[in-house]
């Protein structure tokens, strides 16, 4: 399937608002891919399709996860908004013909992050966070930081996400904690080496 065909298919699968968001994430991911020397076509496809399962709701999403043998952890089971990452990865594979593991993994982890993220995973995670349609206090700072230091920008966004979840008394996904700890340890190790 060409990217043009994927775009048309996606347009009919998700809401207009979500489609515009997806195009924004795609464009933002391409800019970041250029900056960090990642394959721009992979970034474009992962950005375009990252929310391809977003409009599949509650029971239907759970049913599809069962059908596709997606193993769900307890946090995801009780926090259904997280389902569209794993499910989207499977749908990108089956319905959009994506076989590239890096793209599928970037879609899989875009909502939670994960330990030891690849550059493509980082790009999709942060593009989703800062695309031009996003408006929240502090977003400008992350937008500025991301072109200088993508890791610093991701730590900022993970911190904010974690705080936000805690303030609501919500469930914190272990992948989000692991993503943050991994990046902080990496930074500490670098400082130690250079110091
Ligand atoms: Fe998403
Ligand atoms: Fe998104």
Image (spheres, rainbow, N blue to C red):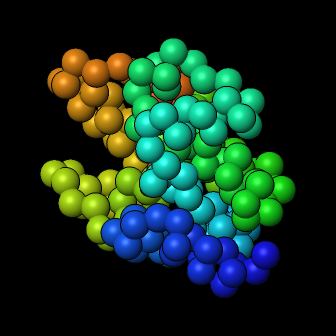
The quarter of the picture where residue 73 lies is top right
Q: Nearer the viewer, residue 168 or 120?
A: 168
For the point 44% across and 37% down, which residue is it? Answer: 58
- Inspect this view and state whether residue 76 appears: yes
Residue 35 visible in the snapshot: no
The total of numbered circles placed on residues is 0
Relative vertical location of residue 6 with respect to residue 134 in this rendering, above or below: below
Write down the quadrant of residue 1 in the picture.
bottom right
Q: Residue furthest right?
A: 99
- Residue 139: image location, x then y, percent: 25, 56
| Residue furthest out toward the bottom | 4
Q: Is residue 122 left or right of residue 116?
A: left
User: Residue at the location (47% across, 64% down)?
Assistant: 14
Estimate the x, y position of residue 194 in percent, counting from the top left. 57, 32
**Residue drawn where x is 70% and y is 46% of the image:** 90
Q: Identify which residue, 7 or 180, lies in the foreground.
A: 7
Horizontal relation, residue 165 to residue 73: left or right: left
Camera-side residue of 103 and 188: 103
* Residue 24 x, y percent position in the rendering: 43, 72
Residue 32: x and y in percent read 54, 66
In this picture, is 171 found above or below 6? above
Say if 111 sits above or below 33 in the image. Answer: above
Residue 98, picture quadrant: bottom right
Residue shown at 38% from the left, 73% from the top = 16
């Amino acid at each position: 399937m060409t990217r043009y065909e994927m775009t048309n298919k996606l347009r009919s699968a998700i809401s207009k608002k979500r489609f515009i968001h997806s195009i924004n994430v795609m464009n933002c991911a391409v800019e970041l891919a250029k900056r960090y020397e990642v394959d721009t076509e992979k970034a474009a496809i992962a950005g375009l399709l990252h929310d391809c399962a977003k409009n599949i709701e509650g029971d239907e999403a759970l049913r599809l996860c069962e059908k596709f043998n997606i193993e769900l952890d307890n946090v995801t089971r009780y926090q259904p908004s997280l389902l569209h990452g794993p499910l989207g990865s499977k749908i990108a594979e089956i319905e959009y013909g994506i076989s590239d593991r890096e793209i599928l993994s970037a879609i899989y982890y875009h909502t939670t992050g994960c330990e030891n993220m690849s550059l493509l995973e980082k790009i999709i995670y942060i593009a989703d966070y800062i695309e031009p349609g996003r408006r929240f206090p502090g977003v400008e700072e992350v937008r500025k930081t991301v072109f200088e230091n993508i890791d610093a920008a991701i730590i900022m966004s993970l911190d904010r996400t974690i705080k936000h979840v805690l303030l609501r008394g919500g469930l914190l996904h272990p992948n989000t904690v692991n993503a943050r700890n991994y990046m902080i340890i990496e930074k500490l190790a670098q400082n130690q080496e250079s110091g």
